[in-house]
Amino acid sequence: MLKGSRVLVTGGSSGIGRSLATALATEGARVVVTGRDAQRLAETAAAHEHIDAVVCDVTDAAQIAALQQQMAATGGIDMLVNCAGVMHFFDVTSGYPLDRQLQEVDIDVAGPVRMVDAFLPGLLERRSTIVNVSSGLAWVPYAAAPVYSGAKAFVHAWTVSLREQLKDTSVRVVELLPPVTDTPLADGLNPSFKRMPPDELVAAFVKGLERGDDEIAPGPVETAEVVEQAGSRLHLRSTQQGTRPMTIAHPDRDVSGDPPSTPTHQLQHDRTEDTCWT
């Protein structure tokens, strides 16, 4: 299904987005990656002859409209992968700037909504796929990244709703729920958390995509079990597939429940940048 298809990947300048773009190109797709950093996008494009790069900010409606017109002029796309994201680590009692919190919402929540709004009319004209990258944190929120955790919970609920509304159309809706993955986005997380190699994640994604899975969650059971030991327990959360335990990962606890030698929030405060981008 991937060979010869045209795929657009947001957040393709690094992390999971870059790994997805490379894997899809290797499978025979023609991939266009977008992001804000032209140099890093060029590095992604250089990784495979079937990857092209276009600078596009998912918070800028005008840039998205121009991108949509550019893609339509060259035949449109068969798959949209919403992977752009940013994660801020902060203490809500510390006076963390509101504009940075809202920036996170603008990228992680409004960004994919803008992309689907722009590209859905063309996708409805052919057999196509929307892939929304959420996170295991949609189910197991990480207290040190409160807005990111909430944003990914939104992406999950929104994706389920899109799938239901589009079930009788030509558009398939898929959700990729990565566990903690060994990318720059995870740098501020508790170092005791296990990290999945990106290549392993994207291999599972491609396999699930070809198998016809609507939700692709590599290692979800292991992720839930690890974090369940780390935080407070909440009520079971119902889904169409049944119920799943929902817990909160506390930033100061490792997987054994004991405080690590250096708490995650302290590690984060020692860094010059409290933001991770995908």
Image (cartoon, rainbow, N blue to C red):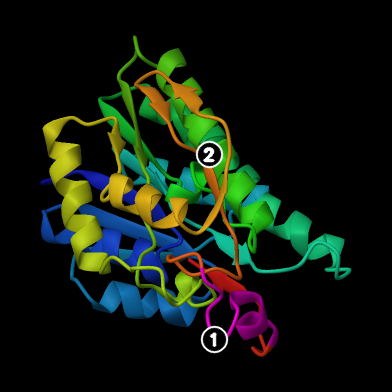
For the point 46% across and 71% down, the residue is: 186
For the point 39% across and 69% down, the residue is: 15
Indicate which disc residue 118 carries: none
Which one is nearer the viewer's eye here, 236 or 128? 236
For the point 69% across and 50% down, the residue is: 105
List the residue tagged with mark 1: 261
- Picture coordinates of residue 240, whole percent (x, y): 39, 18
Q: Earlier in the sequence, mark 2 or mark 1?
A: 2
Disc 2 secondary structure class: helix
Against 112, is 179 above or below? Answer: below
For the point 69% across and 51% down, the residue is: 106
- Picture coordinates of residue 113, whole percent (x, y): 58, 38
List the residue tagged with mark 2: 155
Disc 1 secondary structure class: loop
For the record, the magenta segment spans: 258-269
Give the amino acid at mark 2.
Val
